[in-house]
Image (cartoon, rainbow, N blue to C red):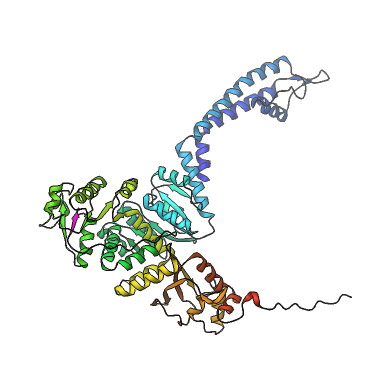
Amino acid sequence: MHNLVFIFLRRLRGPLIVLILVYAISVLGLVMIPGIDDQGQPWNMDFFHAFYFVSFMGSTIGFGEVPYPFTDAQRFWVLFCIYITVFAWLYAIASTLTLLQDPALQHAVTHNSFARNVRNMTEPFYLVCGYGDTGQLVVQGLTQRGIRAVVLDHDQERINALELENLDLFVPGLEADVSRPDVLAEAGLQNSRCAGLISVTCEDEINLKVAITAKLLNPDLPVVCRSEHHDVALNMESFGTDEIVNPFDLFADRLAMALHSPALYAIHEWLTSGPPAPLSEPLQPPRGSWILCGYGRFGKAVEQYLSFEGISATIVEANPSATDAPDEAILGRGTEAVTLKQAGVEQAVGIIAGTDDDTNNLSIIMTARELNPGLFTVSRQNKEENRRIFDAAELDLTMRRSDIIARKILTLVTNPLLSEFFAMANKDDHEWANQLASRIIGVSHPSTPLTWTIHVAKAEAPALAIEIFQGSTVALGELLRDPTDREQLLPVVVLLAKRGSTRFALPAADLVLELGDRILLCGQQQALTRMRGTVANANSLEYVRGGQAPAARAVVTPPRAKST
């Protein structure tokens, strides 16, 4: 507000001075020019009546000779005042309209409105830096889950798109340089309700500076950053960045997971899909010889993870010296049939188009299919605007950076236990994953399951927490019973139980719960609703533990007092 007042006073200084002078001269003239009262005696108007008359005359509200009819001298002066006040007001109004269109004022108004909206937030929120393709997906996912967000971006068009977006919650947005500490502070970096910072701009250096600023100004604030360069990621780690998301490594890891355990890959896709969607079939990439076109950051990550699975890939690179490709790499883009034949496309089982040009990637896939229709096709999509044509190409697997980053961040933010579960699941064998996939299908078919966490604490599970606090022994399996019919089990799968630093994957039903435990489950919405009711309602909890159903309990009516 201080900036707005300063801008108004500075830009309207000239018009205000002109108006004050015109009014002062007009009032002074009316006071000095003598008139005639109703008794025919000379009379001079006082300052109050003069200012009153000039006020409604100069603003063209009306006209009247008060308190007595004017003399010719007074009327001549009034005639002069009419013109100079009208021109003074026209000058002032024109200057005001010009000021209202001034970019500096509009920015100040927007900035003050944004800061006020952030200060007035009463719920926890996440500060999202960058509203490109990834930022849009992150904000959309947060608001769908009832989590508030604040957005900063350097592009006003993206902020305009945010204002037009049909989000479930209002999200304040501001066009500003996200690397400036004062901008981050005003956006709520040090606000007590700020639950975390998410930096997903397309520039690693900017994300690095945001991470450093956040850790210096608010060391305890969780920070999640996007980084596509390993050297920048190491720098982020040195400043204590909590999570660093590299889309190339993530995709390469998922591809290796699909090769190693298709069931585990399917479980990962189901549990991180967000809103319920049809259950997808497990992806089963073939083992054998592969072709990798493009040896940039993406190609290097894919080759590394393929090697972990014992799969060798023939590399095709147009600029081997710039990408530090191995000596045996084939020179070319991969869009030409001769290059693909030289790479052995006719004997290969899969091809990965990983260049930074979407047109070339699609051309590589189309050319390879003509030479070997049975190829398993994987392609990198660089621009979100090309999603439709990549969908039309019907690839077996598409690498979309924005989707991968957003899905990972939303998992970290909304359900951190899920990441811990996958870290443990990667260490188990194929049979374990196959059995778990079958159980998940059994409780959620035909759509993907929801995931949620039960925290054994008074704030989130009051009935359960009080029961344990009073010394009762509550087993995990008791919570899995249907509160409407305890003989039936809810269609859920318990994925993980965490107690302090100890974690139990797929814990047994006889696990005795303790205060502070966190339980990760998946299932349908109805199961989630009923389980939430069980841990929050003492009657429902007593019933599932073997007591009487709440609806069947006798209602004892106290005797009514006799009236006297």
Please, is residue 33 above or below residue 360 in the view?
above
Picture coordinates of residue 476 (x, y %)?
48, 79
Answer with left or right where residue 405 lies relative to residue 14: left
In the displayed orientation, state which residue is furthest to the right.
Answer: 564
Tell me if I can see residue 225 in this picture. Answer: yes
Report the predominant secondary structure element of the magenta stretch: loop
In the displayed orientation, state which residue is furthest to the top.
Answer: 72
Please, is residue 239 above or below residue 485 in the view?
above
The number of numbered badges drawn on the structure is 0
Picture coordinates of residue 375 (x, y %)?
22, 56
| Residue 524 within the segment the image draws in magenta | no
| Residue 294 within the segment the image draws in magenta | yes
Picture coordinates of residue 301 (x, y %)?
23, 60
Answer with left or right where residue 349 lies relative to residue 42: left
Tell me if I can see residue 242 in this picture. Answer: no
Is residue 320 or residue 332 the one in the foreground?
Answer: 332
Picture coordinates of residue 198 (x, y %)?
39, 58
Please, is residue 189 above or below residue 505 in the view?
above
The C terminus lies in quadrant: bottom right
Is residue 159 or residue 281 the one in the foreground?
Answer: 281
Instruction: State which quadrant residue 282 falls in.
Output: bottom left
Residue at left 38%, top 51%?
130
Instruction: State which quadrant residue 539 falls in.
Output: bottom right
Residue at left 28%, top 53%?
395
Answer with left or right where residue 501 lies relative to residue 72: left
In the displayed orientation, state which residue is furthest to the left.
Answer: 327
Boundaries of the magenta span? 277-295
Please, is residue 160 above or below residue 70 in the view?
below
Answer with left or right where residue 180 lies relative to residue 343: right
Residue at left 70%, top 15%?
73
